[in-house]
Image (cartoon, rainbow, N blue to C red):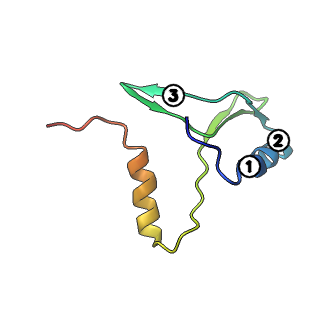
Amino acid sequence: MPAKDRYHLEVVHALRQAGWQVSDKPLNIRIGERDLYPDILAWYEDGRQIVVEIKVFDSDYSAVHHLMEVAGQYSVLPSRN
């Protein structure tokens, strides 16, 4: 399971301040044979739910490079050979 991002606690605090309930348990989403570990699962009293993935870009790479890293991380469909 991945480590928590630098701003994890700040995001949780902001969600709670906005009225969301936030799970303290790690979230595991299995798609096919792949496991994903999003950072936060939250729900609102009206039944809405959200899954939050936190990304911190603290390097000098371009925005396109960062987008490719994030999109590639969540490419969950198996390749077709």
Label 3, label 1: how far apart the Cα atoms are: 20 Å
Please state which amino acid type lies under the numbered disc 1. Val
Q: Residue 80, image x and y in percent?
A: 18, 36
Look at the numbered discs 1 and 2 and tell me whether their residues touch, using CB distance below 8 Å: no
- Figure quadrant of the N terminus: top right
Quarter the C terminus occupies: top left
Does residue 11 sit above or below 78 in this rendering?
Answer: below
Residue positioned 46% across, 53% down in the render? 70
Q: Residue at x 32, y 36 (%)?
A: 77
The image position of residue 13, as x and y in percent, is: 82, 46
Kind of element beneath mark 3: strand
| Residue in the image at 38% along x and 50% along y | 72
Identify the residue under disc 1. Answer: 11
Q: Residues within 10 Å of mark 3 (few under 14, many from 20)?
A: few
Check disc 1 and report its element: helix, strand or loop: helix
Circle 2 sits on which residue?
Answer: 16
Q: Amino acid at mark 2?
A: Arg
As rendered, which of 77 and 3 lies closer to the eye? 3
Dot 2 alpha-carbon crowd within 10 angstroms: few under 14, some 14 to 19, many 20 or more = some
Mark 2 or mark 3: name the one nearer the start of the chain: 2
Q: Is residue 32 above or below residue 75?
A: above
Q: Which residue is mark 3?
A: 29
